[in-house]
Amino acid sequence: MERNEPVRAFHLRFGSHELTESFKQFIEKVLAPKGINHLIVECNTSFVFESHPEITAGTLTKQDAREITAVCKQNGIRVIPLFQCLGHQGWGGAPNSILRVYPEFDETPHIPLDAKWPDFFCRSWCPLHPEVNNLVFELLDELIEAFETDAFHVGMDEVYEIADDHCPRCKGKERSDLFAKAINDMYGHLVKKHGLQMYMWADRLNDSEKTGYNQWEGDTFGTHKAISSIPKDIVLMDWHYDKLDSYPSISIFLEKGFSVIPACWYKTDAAIDLLEESVRQANETAVSERMQGMAVTSWNQWDKEAFDKFMSMNADFASKDGELEELTELYRTLDIITGKLT
């Protein structure tokens, strides 16, 4: 990627050895021709870990990761692995493999396994458990080596289970202090120890009251105050998937000294609006270089059929499809956003 070239990022969840060939073709036939220069591969625990095989919950191997990285390097694409840290340790009350194997790390072990939203969203690990970072850092190190990366995305979106009243370590603590500690712990390992660039989702740093964002895009519990206690060289990926009246967080983050990459989903009109408004705000702050580009996220299930369909699409087909299904509109959004960033 050329220096100062806008970031054109694509995100997807991926953790399948069986689909690696399809994924590599997708990179070569879709992402590279569209000008994507950053690929965020959210593998979480769907990686075959050698240091902790008990955590493995997928089939993506080290060799698969290296093959994906090689294809990306050949096409000028920077690979950024994503591993969800702190929050999103399962769905509803069902824990992921980390908390199934190490239930002592669970921030809310009293929550029933069958709990569902809106009673309960998803589990977090306890940021004050003395052993959790030792395990997690070993998992991150494997992903760093496998993807031969110079950057890492720690997730940290939608963290709601923190400073739980039932946790003997976190009870009574400030949520913002605990959230800042979790961020700084990751920063210490990834940036200070390994020299990587660190990325994270920005929603828990958005003050809902100040920005007008809902509880998903912004924080209503107090974690947003952590922004004053974390390093400014963390790249904040500020996601907004619906068209809003305004996106004040872009200029807030820029004015505080952070670099920002707004992130959209498949809704084309919302994506265009977010990009145009982000550029406008960046130009007004006189630090436009820190509004680095944009990321298109995907949250659909990537299987061979989805990869094949995406590779068979073209912009003309997508624009004439009438009522667009999600995958088709995602293609259209990717096509338009990358075009605007060229």
Image (spheres, rainbow, N blue to C red):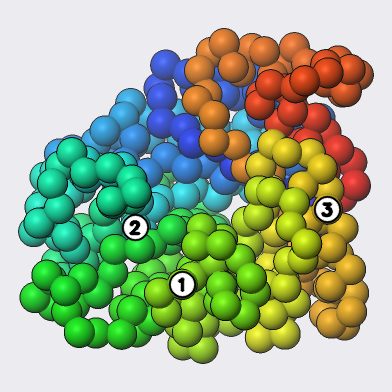
Looking at the image, residue 58 sits to the left or right of residue 278; the answer is left
Mark pair 3, 1: CA separation: 25 Å
Q: Position of residue 206 (x, y in %)?
A: 56, 72
Residue 341 visible in the shown view: yes
Taking the view exactly as shown, the residue that stands out farthest to the bottom is 228
Amino acid type at mark 2? Gly
Q: Which residue is mark 3?
A: 273
Residue closest to the eye, 83 or 157: 157
Nearer mark to the viewer, of 2 and 3? 3
Q: Nearer the viewer, mark 2 or mark 1?
A: 1
| Amino acid type, label 3 | Asp
> On the picture, is 244 further left or further right than 109?
right
Numbered circle sitting on residue 324: none
The residue to which callout 2 is attached is 87
Residue 220, labelled with which disc? Answer: 1
Of callouts 2 and 3, which one flags the residue occurring earlier in the amino acid sequence? Answer: 2
Amino acid beneath label 1:
Thr
Disc 3 + disc 1, Cβ < 8 Å: no
CA separation, marks 2 and 1?
16 Å
**Residue 171 sits in quarter:** bottom left
Q: Residue at x 24, y 36 (%)?
A: 56
Is residue 35 at least partly visible in the picture?
A: no
Q: Nearer the viewer, residue 98 or 62?
A: 98
Q: Are marks 2 and 1 in contact (CB under 8 Å)?
A: no
Q: Secondary structure at mark 2?
A: loop
Measuring 64% from the left and 12% from the top, which residue is drawn there?
A: 308
Marks 2/3 in contact by CB < 8 Å: the verdict is no
Percent of width and height locating residue 151: 54, 58
Sequence-wise, the earlier of marks 3 and 1 is: 1
Residue 58, located in which quarter of the rendered image? top left
